[in-house]
Amino acid sequence: KKTSLGATLLDVIQSGVENLDSGVGVYAPDAEAYTLFSPLFDPIIEDYHVGFKQTDKHPACDFGDGNAFVNVDPEGQFVISTRVRCGRSMQGYPFNPCLTESQYKEMEAKLSSTLSGLEGELKGTFYPLTGMAKDVQQKLIDDHFLFMEGVRFLQAANACRYWPSGRGIYHNDSKTFLVWCNEEEHLRIISMQMGGDLGQVVRRLISAVNEIEKRIPFSLHDRLGFLTFSPTNLGTSVRASVHIKL
């Protein structure tokens, strides 16, 4: 079996075959793979996403009321920083193993143009990894923003081809909003700040995702929700975390 883009079962399992200590070990080379290889993907999705059965259907996207989220540590006793992020894929493009270098570059150009048009607190700068000056690179390292070429799991999944072509980083002027372009996923959208004001972080993420989606359609599946390269990120693809004092 092959998808219409030529992806095979080997593309799906290759990372896990080469890395037997993988947590999951499978990746989707393109959107069609989730359907064509559903006998493999569906049980994994059900197990990882705790009970999302093959008969279940992901609800329509609804971020809910951002004002319902509060500051989880108003006195600043425990939480150092708060971060909420999600992954998104650009509609009409395959995932890493099936992407050509020209597609990587095309996606980076679209995303750079889109993000450069953001205003207000989301306004910032896009930094391509290709040709990045040493001082810019060091600044992004110091800010803990710079991502490096993928770990062995992504290398084995053919997620790092043509590196650093088509990859880039965007952050707003206040360094509370960040987008990674073509790291593991097409887009990794991150909202973060010092302290425990989860509400402010969530509202910024919702605003950013909605603004980007107005300009770039995201890949969406009727049953699985937002599609991603890694099946661990499917659905809402939202994850929240805090750094706490020990």
Image: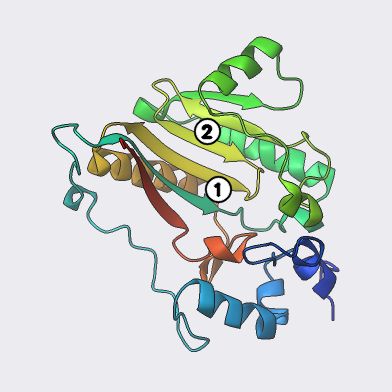
The picture places residue 58, in percent across and down from the top left corner, at 44, 75
Element carrying mark 2:
helix
Which of the pair 104/47 is nearer the observer? 47
Residue placed under numbered mark 1 in the picture: 216
Give the residue type at disc 1.
Answer: Ile
Q: Quadrant of residue 75?
A: top left
Question: Given the current orientation, which residue lies at the most extreme left position?
Answer: 75
Instruction: Give residue 25's quadrant in the image.
Output: bottom right
**Tag of residue 115:** 2
At x 59%, y 54%, the residue is: 89
Q: Nearer the viewer, residue 235 or 112?
A: 235
> Which image quarter is the N terminus in?
bottom right
Q: Quadrant of residue 231?
A: bottom right
Which labelled disc corresponds to residue 175?
A: none
State the quadrant of the C terminus. Answer: top left
Looking at the rendered structure, the number of numbered marks drawn on it comes to 2
Residue 233 in the image: x percent, y percent? 53, 60
Task: Examine the rendered structure and indicate whether residue 208 appears above or below residue 177.
Answer: below
**Residue at image x 35%, y 27%?**
121
Query: Furthest-front residue in view?
Result: 246
Provide the secondary structure element on which disc 1 rests.
Answer: loop
Q: Considering only vertical position in the picture, is 213 above or below 145?
A: below
The x, y position of residue 149, in whole percent, is: 73, 38
Q: Are marks 2 and 1 in contact (CB under 8 Å)?
A: no
Left or right side of 167 for 172:
left
The residues bearing labels 2 and 1 have C-alpha atoms spaced at a distance of 10 Å
